[in-house]
Amino acid sequence: MTPLRQKMIDAMQVRGFSARTHQSYLSAVSALAQYYHRTPERLSVDDIQAYFQYLVKDRGLSGASCRLYLNAIRFLYLQVLKQATFDVPFQIPKKAQRIPELLTRAEVGQILSAVRNTKHRVMLTTCYGCGLRVSELVALKVRHIDGERHLLRIEQGKGAKDRQEILSEGLLHPLRAYWQRYHPSDWLFPGREPDQPLDVSSPQRVFTVAKCRAGIDKVGGIHSLRHAYATHQLEAGLPVHQLQQLLGHRDIRTTLHYVHWIPRYREGEGG
């Protein structure tokens, strides 16, 4: 491992970046170094702008993908290398603003019913019922469930924040039945080895297969369940600031995206 790579890892660890961010940022910086066949410390601002032109014109990357590279490269130069000269507005395509193909309540029900394995069905039900990110789903432990208070504890979600989700009776009941059948001791949804959590790819595959079996052809992976949870909560009249807390959003503007996806939303007016 090069000293620069280790320095970047240390900087991300200090800031509490997630494992996925570690992987994405290191991959982006590595790709930059491989493109120029020299260390990023020897590159100029013009080199970086030329690299973004290559990403757009030659590789055809989208605005969202280019922004990931931009965030990684800016972090490297501004936070790790402390080179203020790189604090300039690099030109990249704007991120496309698209409304995802939102799942209806009926479609979510069809997908969950199409899951044949009990463990997997409860897993996806929990993902939807609490609006979890897939990384939060696989990190759940048995002790995170407070059945008496109907709460689910999310430890160190995105942004290294803890939060609590409300467990409805409709979700708590299958969770109890699941525990009585499988008796997980540590991880709520363990991997093949009881002392190891599931990899995030596992629930993603389960969702994709279930969606196919249900005959749902809308675009989107397991994160569609989180989108569905959020929009269904708003349609039921949940105030935006409460949804922000449930989703674990740091910025209310992120939560407001869901409001824009529901043209007829009126706070406090459930349908």
Image (cartoon, rainbow, N blue to C red):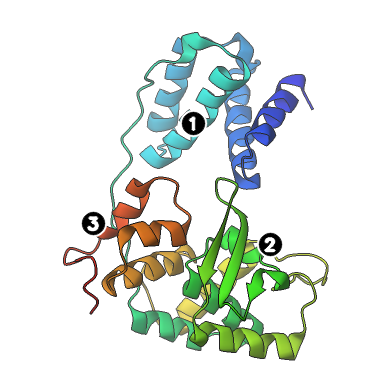
Going by the numbered disc 3, the residue's amino acid type is: His
Quadrant in the rendering for residue 53: top left
Q: Secondary structure at mark 2?
A: loop
Mark 3–mark 2 Cα distance, whole angstroms, equals 33 Å
Q: Is residue 38 above or below residue 12?
A: above
> Residue at label 3?
260
- Image spot of residue 199 (x, y percent): 68, 62
- For the question of whether residue 261 can be seen, the reply is yes
> Which residue matches tag 2?
199
Q: Secondary structure at mark 3?
A: helix
Local crowd at mark 2 within 10 Å, few (<14), some, or many (≥20)? some
Disc 1 packing (10 Å; few <14; some 14–19; many ≥20): few
Q: Which residue is drawn at the image coordinates 30% and 53% (left, top)?
A: 257
Q: Foreground: 114 or 234?
A: 234
Q: Residue furthest front?
A: 149
Q: Is residue 253 left or right of residue 81?
A: left
Amino acid under label 1? Asn
Q: Nearer the viewer, residue 222 or 16?
A: 16
Q: Earlier in the sequence, mark 3 or mark 2?
A: 2
- Foreground label between 1 and 3: 3
Residue type, label 2:
Asp
Q: Residue at x 80, y 76 (%)?
A: 185
Residue in the picture at 63% in, 61% down: 200
Which image quarter holds the N terminus? top right
x and y percentages locating residue 107 in the rendered image? 37, 81
Q: Which residue is mark 1?
A: 71
In the image, taking residue 203 as reference, residue 99 lies left or right, namely left
Q: Position of residue 86 (x, y in %)?
A: 48, 13
Question: Element under label 1?
Answer: helix
Question: Which comes sooner in the sequence, label 1 or label 2?
Answer: 1
Does the image show residue 114?
A: no
